[in-house]
Image: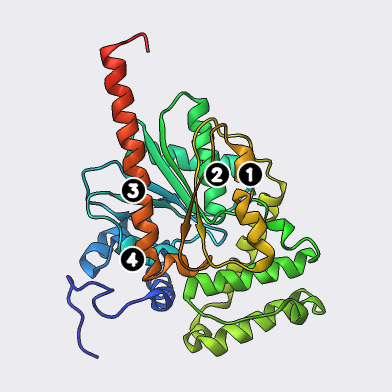
Amino acid sequence: MEPVGAETSFFELGGHSLLVIPMLEQVRKDFGVKLPIATLFEYTTVRALAPLIDQKMSEARPSPLVTLKKTGSRLPLFFVHAVGGHLLSYTEMARSFPKDRPLHAFELVDIQGNPKLQDMAAYYITAMRKVQPEGPYHIGGWSLGGILAQEMARQLKADGVEVGLVALVDSWIRFDELLAQTERETRHAIIYASELNSRYGAGFFVSHEELVGLDFEGKYKLILERFEKQVPIASQFERDMLRQIYEVTGYFIEESHDYKIQTYPGQLTLFVAENVDESAKELVKEGLGWAEHTTEPLIIERVPGDHVTMLRRPQVSVLLGALERHLRKVEEASAKAKKKSEKDPSC
């Protein structure tokens, strides 16, 4: 193996999502530091990573906010993790993001104390305001991340803070209706399999019929067998880490089931995948349940791909184009309103 230069990027060396886990696991073993999966988006070289490892060795609790793209003169977009708590699903999004806009994201730090979604949203707001002290804030999220983004925007509005675009990317708040006849453990297993596919681009399939007759351990074992068959390198992953993913998805499933969404006093923009099952088409027409949780008409934008592939190339370029178009529209409206207010303070 040829030596790696201190300034050589992980991605330039051929790094991808499946290689992130073994590398960060080696860092944990060598230095006793557990780095967030999204670390390699921002710290791509050995020279950049070294001081971060030193810093993390002295930190009590890391920040949930990760900078996926630093540069840009426009207001940043803050994006929230999905059910797995990680940011690997946003890899292509970060690499293809518009040049003139920064991108920050929130990664799950831990679930100690079993925080409610409202508490998690408040925690993310605190981290966000350290990076951008004043509004307006552009906030979004994919899947479960959309629910957390809406809650963050709602809390900010309640505090009198200006909010810009609230982008809900294929975020289903009536997902339970599709799985209404599925018992809870099987539902958890189906979402766990989907999470592994999303996180690692695995592409394996486990049917409801295969899972429903198995106990908890049987479901878990079957999913891992399919996963490792499709992605051989997965056999090198730490079993504790894969088990933790299972536990985290279960935690968020339970929390989102118990969470009562409150109405957002403003505009919500929903980006929906074009490829959906026949059984879900009616829910898509109804805005996935979001229309009843906003005081203004829900904006719906269709994006090519399905729930997972809409975040991958080439579909992600269409999604990012639509996001940027709506971001600029909101910014232009805000600038006009500000200008009008300056001319006529009574407005």
Q: Which numbered disc, 3 or 2, marks the residue that appears first in the sequence?
A: 2
Secondary structure under tag 1 reads loop
- Look at 27% across and 67% down and name the residue there: 44
Residue 282, percent from left and from top: 66, 57
Mark 1 vs mark 3: give the one in front. 3
Q: Find residue 265 and report its horizontal and vertical position in percent.
A: 54, 30
Which of marks 1 and 4 precedes in the sequence?
4
Mark 1 vs 3, N-terminal side: 1
**Side of 212 relative to 305 (left or right):** right
Q: Quadrant of residue 218?
A: bottom right
Which of the pair 195/330 is nearer the observer? Answer: 330
Report, in whole angstroms, how far the alpha carbon at label 4 lies from the one at label 2. Answer: 24 Å
Kind of residue indicated by mark 3:
Arg
Identify the residue under disc 1.
116
Q: Earlier in the sequence, mark 4 or mark 2?
A: 4
Q: What residue sits right under mark 4 in the picture? A: 40
Type of the residue with mark 4: Leu
Dot 2 corresponds to which residue? 120
Callout in the foreground (3, 2): 3
**Residue matched to label 3:** 325
Name the foreground residue: 51 vs 83.
83
Q: CA distance from mark 4 to mark 1?
A: 29 Å
Q: CA distance from mark 3 to mark 2?
A: 29 Å
Q: Residue at x 36, y 76 (%)?
A: 16
Quadrant of the rendering where the C terminus is positioned = top left
Q: Describe residue 92's horizontal placement relative to residue 3 as left or right.
A: right
Q: Is residue 176 visible?
A: yes
- Judged from the image, the secondary structure of the residue bearing numbered disc 2 is helix
